[in-house]
Structure formats: structure tokens, C-alpha cells
Amino acid sequence: MDINTIKKTRRNIILILFLSIICLLLISFLPWIAVAENGSVKENLHFNFEMMEDSDNLQINGLLNILMDIYILFWTIVIISLISFIFIVYYALIKRTLLFRMLILASSSIIFVLCAFVVYFQIIFSRTIDEIDSISASMMIPPFAYAYVQFIISIFLLIFSGFYTINIINDTTKHFKSYKIQKKEKKKELEQKTTKGISIESEIEKSLKIPSKTDSLKNSSREEKLAEIDKLLAKKDSDKDKQKEDVDISKKESDKQVKDNLPSENEKIVYEEKETEEEPIEDVEPEIKDNKQIKHPFPEKKPKKEIEKSDEIKLSEHFEKVLSTAIEKKQSEIKPKQQKEEKIIKNEKVEPSQIEKKQELIKPDFENDSYQKDIKENLTDKILKIKCPECNYIFPYNKESGKKIICPKCGKEGKIEIKI
Amino acid sequence: MIDEEEEAEKESENKEEKKIYKTKDQMLDESFKQAEILKTDKSKKVDKYISPKKPFIKIGALIIIIAIIGLIIINYVPFLYINYETSDTSIKQYFSYGDFKNDLIEPEKIYSLFESTCIDCSDNSDSYIGLTINDFTDTPKFTIYIFYIMIFIGAIFTIFILVDKKKNFSENTITIVHTIFTAFIILAGIIILFLNIKFLSANLLQKLNNSFLFALDFNKIQMLYFMTYFLIMISTILFIIGLILMKLNLNKAVDKFNLLSSENNNLRYKYRSKI
């Protein structure tokens, strides 16, 4: 069911329930008829539903039967509307199946038919009152009878129930039409790509059931690759800058700790370069070329580099000192653990060969586990699978690409809104 | 003189340089601080997933309280109050607390208001205000039963919520239970309203059929049904609560219908259409 129809059904079902309950209460509240008395008091005696029940007059009993029918109809409308309310909630939350869709449709059509019967019985009630001479409708203000109040409300009820049913019928017809069109299109496609030994109908049904996972996976893998390349490029740039800074800092004696940390960062660079060599960039690059939408991943980074270079030229000795102290601060705060380890190594006065061994031991852990996990986590953060509410097609979405989304299959536009 | 000028120039240059260094230093510190904040924020976002706390739904308890109040009203609030003038212009009052049928009312003609004693026999009706003596006994009895049912349903719902706190049911199951519960509340509200609205209707008929009551020697009669007024008030409150809950449940269902969660991370996304 479409979200638009769900919203409309929500509004209509509340209105139907509210109006039907009011009508039900009005049956026992309103005085319906006035009977001319010929006793000591020669006036009209007003009758409500309870009084009509107690009466022995046959004509009144005939009218009571019609009222009883209306009363029963309203009770059934109330109960069916409550059931359909539960159906709607259940459908929207858990089971979006055809069975529930049909149940909602059936309940809405029953409500509409019952409302139509209510109006019909009320018309009959007023006609029978007109036919009897001694009985007249109980008047609120002379031309306006009390019974009209309920009649007007029941007409409103009929209109709303009509809207309710039309809304659901339209949605179901749309659904079936779209299903047929999709089936035809798929048939045509498959006829073109007919292969021996594969039945066409089974394939159509398979493809129509749920948008295939393979398509989404293909797209997602492509997106993931692109995102990976973006990440690596960004890391490369940042590490190159870091390298330059570190080379300047290494000249001074005060930056011994920074010097000690440098190898670990160099390792990163080495690893990343290895990864870039290992990764099938050649396979991905043609895809980038094919899609004209995807241009350079970091077009804004060029002017930044230029600015940094110009700053480097202007750097004086004092500024270098300030820079070095700031970097010291940063690194001392960010990597206290590394410093601790280094201090321990220094205190123990381990031989350089042993340190190298330790570094080698650390290397593979860093390369294999933590760094790869970081990349994976970042990628999973970026790319999400999103299901289109119109055609149920699952497609990948990159969080950084913006809030607007368009379904690649049916072209439904929408906005993405984060809800934590 | 020239040396002094040169010294002054040097001093001024030094001051300017110091100023530049200070500003640059400040700029660097700020940029590092910002970078740190950004880094820490990201880590926080990744590490600390804010799991939505399930609110303890107190509606079950509220329904129990309403039902208990209703039972108290039935037992302690006067059901009927009659005030009328006799032919001697003397005012007579009468109070009834429920057991109207077994009360020995004086004068007995008060019964004729609710049951025809053939003072002025009419073939059309036994009573002029649409109430019988049985209504005074049956209505509180049935309303008491409904209040008991309400207490039972409310208790079940509160137990379910308490169990949910430990067993952690899914949101969908909670909302479905909630919808069934609201349907029961609405039904209970309607039944109580339907049982008691005839007393309100009696007041309207009293005005319309006043001449017939006057013929029965009830001049300037006032009939008030305090208990039923309170019960109608309670049932309307129940009915309104039911409708509000119904709307809330439907809203929740629509939101869920429009909400899509990602499998990779614990964020939930809302696909908003152009409606």
C-alpha cells in the first residue's frame, strides 16, 4: 500500500469510528416520535428509543423495528471499524501481505454498504412516520426534527466511508495494474534474452517478487570500491603532508618523540601504497570513466595544497618552533599509549635489533586487522541499503551524497531524514 | 641619531613579528582543538549508540484508576434526586443511593414517574421520561461489571509492560498489543455511555413531556441523576483517551511504514515522499 493511502485511511477510519459512535449514542438519546394523546392532557407525547421499546402500540412497534435495524447496523459499523483499525496497524507494522490488503478492502466496503443501509433505513423510517396520521416526528424547532441530526451525521458517515473504500480500491487497482505492466515488461525483456532450458514464467515471477539482491549487491560493491578509492586518496594526501612536517621537525632535538613516532606513520604509507598496488584499480577506473557523473573525488583539495606550500615558504624559525610545540601537544594527547610503550622500551634499554623485531611484530597486526577494520567500518557507515516505498527496489545510498534521493527504478523522489 | 632610529625600527619590527607569531600560534591552537573535537565526536558517535529507551506506558494503571473511581462513584454518589412542588405548594425532596426498587419511597406516587400506575392511562406508553424502575437497578449492575473488566484488562496490560521491561519485546508487538488494548477501551467507553445516556435523555423528555408530569401532580419537578452524570463523564474521558491512543497508534504505524532501517549501522532512516 502506498504511504499516501495509508495516511488517508488513518484519517478516514478515525472519522468513521467517531461518527458511528455518536450516531449510536444519539439513537438512545434523541426523542424520535411524537404521538397525539387523547386523555386528560391533549398534547403530543414525545418518545425516545427506550419509551418505544416499552410501548404496546403496534404502529410504534413497527417504527421501533426500523430503529432497531439502524441500531444494530451502527453497532456492526463500530465493531468492523475497530477491527479494520487493528488490521491497518497490523498491516503497516508487520504483515504487508495481499491477504491483509484484501481484508482492509473488504472491511471498508462492508462499512460503506452498512452506511448506505443506515441511510436507506432512515429514509424508510421518515416515510413510515409520514404515512401514520397519529404519529409525527419529534420536532426540535418546528420544521427541523430531532431525527434530522442523526440523518445528517449518517450522510457524513456515508461520504467518509465512500472516500475510505474508494481510496483503498484505487490503491489495489494501481497495485494490480503495476504488477501486470511489470510482468509484461519482464516478459518482453526475457523474450529478447531467451536462453534454452530456462522457463520464462518462473523467471518473471522470481524477478517480480522482490527486487533481486544481486542487483543491489552489484551496485553496492561498485559504490564500496569507489568509496575505498576516495578514502585511500584522502589518506595519501594527508600522510604526505604529515611526512613533510615531520621531516622539518626531525631537525630539532626537542622533537625526539615525534621522530620516534615517524616510522609507524611511514609504515602506514607503505601499507597504503601496497594496498593500492594490490587493489584492482584498473578494473574500477573504467567504471569511473563510464559514469560521467562521478568526477574527481577531491576536486577541492588542489587549492589547499597550494596554500600549504606557500605557507611553507614563509615559515620562519619562530613559526617552526610554534608548530613543533603544537604538534608535540597534539601527539602527546592523541597517542599516549605509544609514548608509554616507547618509554618502557627506552627504560629497558633493549637493543635496536630487538626493537626492529618488535616493530615487525606490530606491523602485520596493524596492517591486517585494525586498519582494515577501520576501512570496513567507515564504508559501512557511509553506504546504506535503502528500500523504495513505491516499488520496493533496494538500492545503495551514500550518506555523503546528500539528502535527496531518487529511486533508480521507478523515479520516486524523496528525502532522507536521520532518526536516532 | 641614526642608530637610535634604526634601533627603534628594529624594535617596531620585532613587535610586529611577535604579534604575527602570537596570532599564528592562536590560530594553530584553535585548529588543533577543532580537529580534536571533531575526532572525539566521531569516536563518540561510533562507540556510543543511543538505544531508544522504552517508555513505561502508564495507561494500564490509568485505566485501573479510572475504573476504581467509577466503582467508588457507583457506591457513594446518590443516584437520584427528586425535588417537586405539591398541590399544597409544599416542596418535597427525595434521595436514592442505588437500591431504588427496594426503597420504601413516600409518597408512593413517585413510582408513577417511572412506571404507569394508571392515573391517566395511556395505551402508547408506560412512562413519560423513558425510564423504568428496572433501569435503576440494572444500569449500575452492568456498569460495575464493565469496570471489573476494565480493571482486568488494565492489569493485564500493565503486567505485559512489566514483562516487556525484562524480556524486551519488539516495538511492533507492543504497538499491536496497544491497539487491541485501545479497541477494548473504546468499546468499554461506548458501553458505559450507552447504558447511562438514557438518564440524560430522560432530562430532555422531562422538559418535552412536562405537561403530562404536571397532570400527575408533579409541579415544578426537578430530577437529577448524579451518579449517571459522573459515569457519563468518566465514559467520555475513556472514549477520548481511546481515540487519542488510536490516533497515536496509527501515527506510529504510519511512521514505521515509512521508516527504513539500515543493517550495517544502528541508524534509522525515514524515506519522506513529496506528500
Image (spheres, coloured by chain):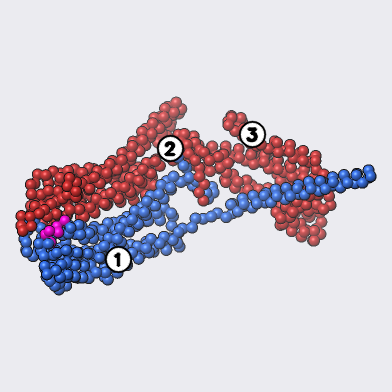
| SS at mark 3 in the image | loop
Total numbered labels = 3
Q: Secondary structure at mark 1?
A: helix
- The amino acid pointed to by label 3 is His
- Residue B193: x %, y % from top left: 26, 58
Label 3: how many residues lie within 10 Å, few (<14), some (14-19) or many (20+)? few
Badge number at residue B70:
1
Element class at badge 2: loop
Q: Is residue A170 magenta?
A: no
Mark yes or no: residue A280 visible: no
B68 w.r.t. A216: above or below: below
Instruction: Specify which label sits upstream in the sequence, 3 or 2.
Output: 3
Q: Nearer the viewer, residue A214 or B121?
A: B121
Residue furthest front as drawn: B89
Q: Would residue B272 appear left or right of A78 to someone viewing this image?
A: right
Residue at 26% from the left image edge and 69% from the top image edge:
B77
Q: Which mark is on residue A296?
A: 3
The amino acid pointed to by label 1 is Gly
Q: Position of residue B196 (x, y in %)?
A: 23, 60
Residue located 24% across and 45% down the image:
A152
Of badges 3 and 1, nearer the viewer stands: 1
Residue at the spot of label 2: A391
Pick whichever, B125 or A85, lies toward us. B125
Residue placed most toward the observer, B121 or A108: B121
Chain red in the figure, letter: A
The blue-tinted chain is B
Q: For the residue carrying disc 1, how many other residues have a C-alpha within 10 Å: few (<14), some (14-19), or many (20+)? A: many
Residue A348 visible in the snapshot: yes
The range drawn in magenta is B208-213
Instruction: Calculate the distance from the C-alpha at mark 2 to the C-alpha at mark 1.
Output: 51 Å
Tell me whether marks 2 and 1 sit on the same chain.
no
Which residue shows up at 19% across the image and 70% down it?
B94
